[in-house]
Image (cartoon, helix red, strand yellow):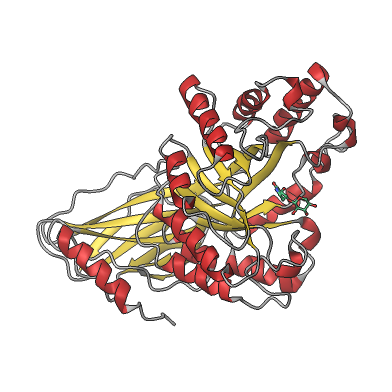
Amino acid sequence: MPIPRRALLATAVASVVAAASIAVVGSAEAATTLGASAAQTGRYFGVATGANRFSDTAYMTIVNREFNSLVAENDMKWDATEPQQGRFNYTNGDRLVSHAQSQGMSVRGHALLWHQQQPSWAQGMSGSALRNAAINHVTQVATHFRGKIYAWDVVNEAFADGGSGGRRDSNLQRTGNDWIEAAFRAARAADPGAKLCYNDYNTDGVNAKSTGIYNMVRDFKSRGVPIDCVGLQSHLGTTLDSTYQQNIQRFADLGVDVQITELDVAQGGNQANIFAAVTRACLAVARCTGITVWGVRDSDSWRTGENPLLFDNSGNKKAAYTSVLNALNAGGPTTPGSPSPSPSTSNPPVPGGCAAQVTLNSWNGGYTATVRVSAGSSAVSNWSVAVTVPSGGAVTSTWNATNSGTSGQVTFRNVSYNGQIAAGGFTEFGFQGTGTGPTATPTCTAG
Ligand code: XIL
């Protein structure tokens, strides 16, 4: 049952629409899960999990209901995937990917190279032997998962804490300062479709460490080293840096996406507020494409005793959950600018008629579609859009419209607040689906 929109938001939207004198772009009927709500602005809301959790049915009920992206908390790390040199084990990583695909969820890959959780054979190596082993690891693992990963954390936690803004000492760093770019180049060659991220913690505002990373990303972009995104882990305490959003924005301004990759927040008076503020900061930056929380229930968290997650030990939604959901639902029409979606061709709207054009944000096994419905030279008072969903896939959620059917030919109709489109104006609705997204131009019918 739809929850009434809050008056404040409706007023804000109405005034923006009036100022722009275009058709109503309503806020969504409030979505009731984190994934569906994030999808309304083209984003994902993910969770860290592992194949060893898949038999816990209470846990999996929450995972499958709430999230539309998964990351392996441990299953894709170096020690898990290459326990002996040259002998790879993808059993648990593959299970995670298949589960995500069966649910139409995207997958973040975490992490190709890191100074922690290295297999013991690598810990004992140095110099060119280690460099070669590390690059081989990147190549093999990224090749194995090729086409299945939305974004890879190619390098994790390579910068030092404190004021230096420089690299952390590690066996990898001692192979030469260019180890990070070598890793990114190898990852691009192995899986050209994955977004390649640098991921780190204590980067929750403009500070010496995040500035060191910023300078590296700027350098990579200027020299053509392939990098597409920066992950801000966001393992947070009881306060949030006032420059949290500004920091996201400055990375976005370099031309990379930003993702909140491991969000958890110490329980305290501010927990719900901090979760909401992080969510709002991501939604405020078009290139902030998604948020992942680092576990489901407090009892699942690596931060034992800090109760830093959105569900309590019994799987009940905490206040922090509600604050995140509300922040997502208030997100407005800020669609991420990347991956750059290419709108399908659309038939020009005829007088008295309407036209629809689809923009897809796809990953292996799923997609979100944003559909723009445009009026021709006359106003439209009600509309329906017929979309052909490719076989094998199905629509799993819809916003700003209602759908009849979920597969084959699916018809979307306006909801109460977006049926009216002024002459020359447009409105947008969206849906999420499994499989591959629709490519044929949809048919729009007015009236
Ligand atoms: C943590 C996992 O949550 C634990 O289960 C594991 O024992 C240690 O690693 N930064 C990261 C994550 O990038 O991989 C870490 O995950 C948490 C800190």
Quadrant in the picture for the C terminus: bottom left
Image point (74%, 30%), residue name: 169
State whether residue 326 is above or below residue 237.
Answer: below
Residue farthest toward the top in the current orientation of the protein: 128
Image point (65%, 21%), residue name: 178
**Marker count (numbered):** 0
Asked whether 2 or 118 is in front, the reply is: 118
State whether residue 60 is above or below residue 93.
Answer: below
Asked whether 187 or 55 is in front, the reply is: 187
In the visual, does 437 lie left or right of 238? Answer: left
| Res. 127 image quadrant | top right
Image point (23%, 66%), residue name: 24
On the image, the x and y values in percent for residue 16 come to 22, 62
| Res. 294 image quadrant | bottom right
On the image, the x and y values in percent for residue 28 come to 37, 69
On the image, the x and y values in percent for residue 417 come to 26, 73
State whether residue 427 is above or below residue 175.
Answer: below
State whether residue 165 is above or below residue 202.
Answer: above
In the visual, does 151 lie left or right of 140? Answer: left
Residue farthest toward the front in the current orientation of the protein: 163
On the image, the x and y values in percent for residue 81 come to 80, 40
Asked whether 410 or 325 is in front, the reply is: 325
